């Protein structure tokens, strides 16, 4: 793999795990809400927020994966722009994880699942 440190690789793998866990949590919460309350005006708003979380997590996962593969295929070195984009994508994914987790917790509180 061209010019990527073990630290960054471990960070990305950790983010992958967190993204997958958050997707699972959002979908499980969505399922619980539908099962307990069905589709109402109130739950539709919460369900849409949860679906948006899943989409953001999926996009972050895909973006990181695409960049990591591009860097792996770049030999002997990856261009600086791609490496910079990878770092920005890592930071964005980490920010999305934190805010999305808070939104899931809020959704659970709002619907009485907590």
Image (cartoon, rainbow, N blue to C red):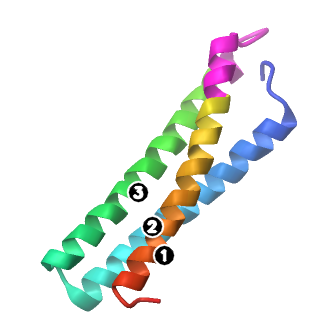
Residue 73 painted magenta: yes
In the picture of the structure, the residue carrying the numbered disc 3 is 54
Q: Quadrant of the N terminus?
A: top right
Q: Position of residue 57 (x, y in %)?
A: 48, 51
- Of discs 3 and 1, which sits in the foreground? 1
Q: Position of residue 12 (x, y in %)?
A: 70, 43
Which residues fall within the magenta stretch? 71-86
* Residue found at x 23% / y 77%: 43
In the picture of the structure, the residue carrying the numbered disc 1 is 105
Q: Is residue 109 left or right of residue 65?
A: left
* Residue found at x 70% / y 23%: 72
Asked if marks 2 and 1 touch (Cβ < 8 Å), the reply is yes
Give 95 or 65, whichever is nearer the viewer. Answer: 95
Q: Quadrant of residue 69?
A: top right
In the picture of the structure, the residue carrying the numbered disc 2 is 103
Residue 109 vertical placement versus 98 (above, below):
below
Counting residues from the start of the chain, the first of labels 2 and 3 encountered is 3
Instruction: Give the class, few, some or many, for how many residues have Cα within 10 Å of label 3's Cα (few <14, many ≥20).
Output: many
Residue extending furthest left? Answer: 41
Give 78 or 91, whichever is nearer the viewer. Answer: 91
Residue 106 vertical placement versus 1 (above, below):
below
Which element is circle 2 on? helix
Which element is circle 3 on? helix
Q: Position of residue 78 (x, y in %)?
A: 71, 13
Is residue 68 visible in the rendered structure shown here?
no
């Amino acid at each position: 793999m061209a010019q990527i440190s073990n630290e960054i690789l471990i960070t990305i793998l950790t983010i992958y795990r967190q993204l997958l866990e958050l997707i699972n949590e959002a979908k499980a919460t969505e399922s619980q809400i539908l099962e307990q309350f069905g589709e109402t005006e109130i739950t539709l708003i919460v369900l849409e927020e949860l679906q948006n979380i899943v989409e953001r997590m999926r996009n972050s996962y895909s973006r990181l994966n695409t960049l990591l593969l591009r860097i792996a295929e770049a030999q002997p070195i990856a261009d600086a722009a791609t490496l910079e984009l990878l770092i920005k994508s890592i930071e964005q994914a980490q920010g999305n994880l934190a805010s999305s987790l808070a939104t899931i917790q809020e959704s659970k509180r709002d619907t009485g699942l907590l």
